Image (tube, rainbow, N blue to C red):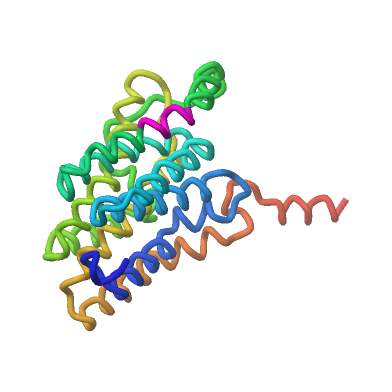
Amino acid sequence: KTAGDGAGSRAAATAGFVMIALPGVARYAQEARPYAFAVAAVAVSTLLLFRGLTRNERRWWVGYAASLVVVGYFHLLSLLVVPGQFIAVLFIGPRQWRGFAAAAASASLAVLPVAVLGFAQRGQIGWIPPVQFDYLWTGLSVLTGSLAVTACLAVFVVGSRGDRRLMALGFSTALATPVLLWILSQLTPLYLARYLLAAAPGIAVLVAAASTTMTTARLLVLAAILVALVLPQQIAVRGPAAHNQDYRGAAELVATD
């Protein structure tokens, strides 16, 4: 984002650093599955939403609608971030609600075929276990790697006085998916850790917003602490059995026969 949008290059670099540092993002970025593309599309939609709210140009809303369609076609449940984005609209630019509504409605119509087909095949996820109450506060640890990292980032954000618009955007989009998925899972089995990945861009924006008023020295200290906390998980997700399938070990076993 640009300085005119309420953030600068340092905030942009911070957001990128956080996305790279999150072990959950790194883990699913390695797989030939739709999650990485869905996360990228959510990140793009978040940027275009902010542009639409801060600049009076229709093209940003058109782009936002298109990005939501991409999100829906890659991973339907990632669209749970949209209610969080609507909350951000109310805080950042409530007068722009018509643009948001038009974009969201257009995207919903385009994604409707996927929703219909998905509902018809809902039996395919019937094996998902019932949701637990503690998922409300442990869910985000799937992305951060541990409760310690989650707590570290939370303390950093709470103790900061960052850009309010970006804070609202990051907070609402980081919590929308975990909370709404937990609520929906009370009705039907839906809660899987990897379905929370749409919250990752919100976490990155939230931390980046908190960094806008922090000195470079303190920001570097935070980065060092974050690296120390996530390094074991980052190493683990690159191991031969990191994805619950030790293909290298299986190949070595076959080679011995």
Please identify the residue farthest to the bottom as the structure is shown. 217
The answer to which of 18 and 212 lies nearer the viewer is 212
- Point out the residue furthest to the right here: 257
The answer to whether residue 135 of the structure is visible from this angle is no
Q: Horizontal placement of 208 versus 227: left or right? A: left
Residue 107 forms part of the magenta stretch: yes
Q: Residue 73 location, x and y as percent?
A: 53, 36
Q: Confirm whether the magenta stretch covers residue 245.
A: no
Q: Is residue 163 above or below residue 139?
A: below
Q: Position of residue 14 (x, y in %)?
A: 32, 69
Image coordinates of residue 119 in percent, x first then y, are 50, 19
Q: Which is nearer the eye, 128 or 14?
A: 14
Q: Residue at x 30, y 44 (%)?
A: 138
Residue drawn at x 49%, y 45% is 38
| Quadrant of the frame with the N terminus | bottom left
Vertical side of 252 occupied by 42: above or below = above
Extent of the magenta region: 105-111
